[in-house]
Amino acid sequence: MLSNQFVISFSLLLCLPILFFLLAPHVFLPPPRESPIPIADEIDDQILFRRASAGSSSHLSSGTPHPKLKIAFLFLTNSDLHFAPLWDRFFSPHPPSLFNVYVHADPFSNVTVPSSPSSVFRNAFIPSAKRTSRASPTLISATRRLLAAALLDDPANAYFAVLSQHCVPLRSFPFVYRSLFESPPDDPTTTSRGVRLSYRSFLELISDEPRLWKRYVARGRHAMLPEVPFEKFRVGSHFFVMTRRHALLTVRDRVLWRKFKIPCYECFPEEHYFPTLMNIKDPEGCTGYSLTRVNWTATVKGHPYTYKPEEVSSDLIHRLRLSNHSSSYFFARKFMPACLKPLLAIADSVIFRD
Ligand SMILES: *[C@@H]1O[C@H](CO)[C@@H](O)[C@H](O)[C@H]1NC(C)=O
Ligand SMILES: *[C@@H]1O[C@H](CO)[C@@H](O)[C@H](O)[C@H]1NC(C)=O
Ligand SMILES: *[C@@H]1O[C@H](CO)[C@@H](O)[C@H](O)[C@H]1NC(C)=O
């Protein structure tokens, strides 16, 4: 009896150091300092970003009237382009001289190229795409590659809209185009011809998020200093619409990238990098809000609410457009792939009807 107890206590004691060694690497070591981004990819990116920043003008093509300014739609995907047929309908009746489409498809995820020969996505895949993974700085790199590819491709690209495979349009293309390039007559930033004088990026710069400090120190308590003091740190949605001037500034950045590429545990660096960069460089040039609606109630593991096919209705589209800001929402996420059919069914009668 007594010896039995002794054996049990002794084995428990023995277990402790074993447990300690098993847990120790996770509990006591700081996160790895090495970037998860292969050095060869970094070099490729630097070459691309340098080309884009050397060969691009930051100005919106000058001269009024402005028939040639375009919107660059930048799609990020690591699964498929589930809503390609809906987006094709969004683009199809409108002159291609008003937009361009670019896709960053993770080469390791076998993204299917849409089969329709007339799809705008068929020739939109950028060759510089590299592996991406969730909650890692690879999503920052992927977005910068898209910006660089679009800057280089067409000097008329004036606005750059970042979207994912789960995003859907809430408005028609002409509505989006007019809202971005023409301001209402009572807007003081307008010339007599209704052409906007000052263009701003639609990007969130959030400073009152409860987890802001935790996200700031996610790479180590002093890791961001001195370039990024806590007062300058911001978070916001990765799904923004950026001006050409800001896109250029983003591909030119090397200082902040060096900080934000440090791996962090359970954080979403793409939601830190772009808002912090803009907050440091040009906060006045940003609206402070996004044009992409997302439903954060009942969030699971950092994923927002995902709409199911049976929830798709004209009422939902109208509700999702509503905004407390001076512009209504143009896009929304996230939708299950099976929502394609009911969304197509109401495309012409609801979504593209202004
Ligand atoms: C992509 O395709 C390759 C070759 O067919 C396969 O080995 C790989 O598992 C696929 N990857 C994914 C993420 O489906
Ligand atoms: C947001 O998601 C919740 C479920 O978490 C749902 O009840 C609500 O209706 C959604 N809001 C909108 C505007 O769709
Ligand atoms: C607008 O603000 C009200 C009050 O703060 C809030 O309840 C509502 O959810 C907001 N609407 C949107 C679309 O964000």
Image (cartoon, rainbow, N blue to C red):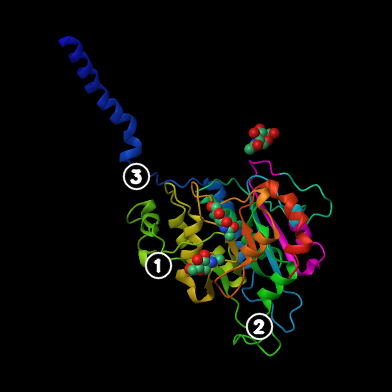
Q: Amino acid at mark 1?
A: Lys
Instruction: From the top left corner, tell me how far across and down residue 140 is, in percent.
Output: 54, 55
**Could you tell which of marks 2 and 1 lies nearer the N-terminus?**
2
Residue range in magenta is 87-111
Q: Secondary structure at mark 3?
A: loop
Q: Which mark is residue 184?
A: 2
Q: Is residue 263 left or right of residue 38?
A: left
Q: Is residue 176 left or right of residue 54?
A: right
Residue at the spot of label 3: 30
Quick check: is 231 in the magenta stretch? Answer: no
Q: Amino acid at mark 3?
A: Pro
Instruction: From the top left corner, tell me how far across and down residue 69 is, in percent.
Output: 72, 74
Q: Amino acid at mark 2?
A: Pro
Q: Seen from this angle, which residue lies furthest bottom?
A: 192
Q: Seen from this angle, which residue lies furthest left?
A: 2
- The quarter of the picture where residue 56 lies is bottom right
Image quarter hosting the C terminus? bottom right
Q: Is residue 57 visible?
A: yes
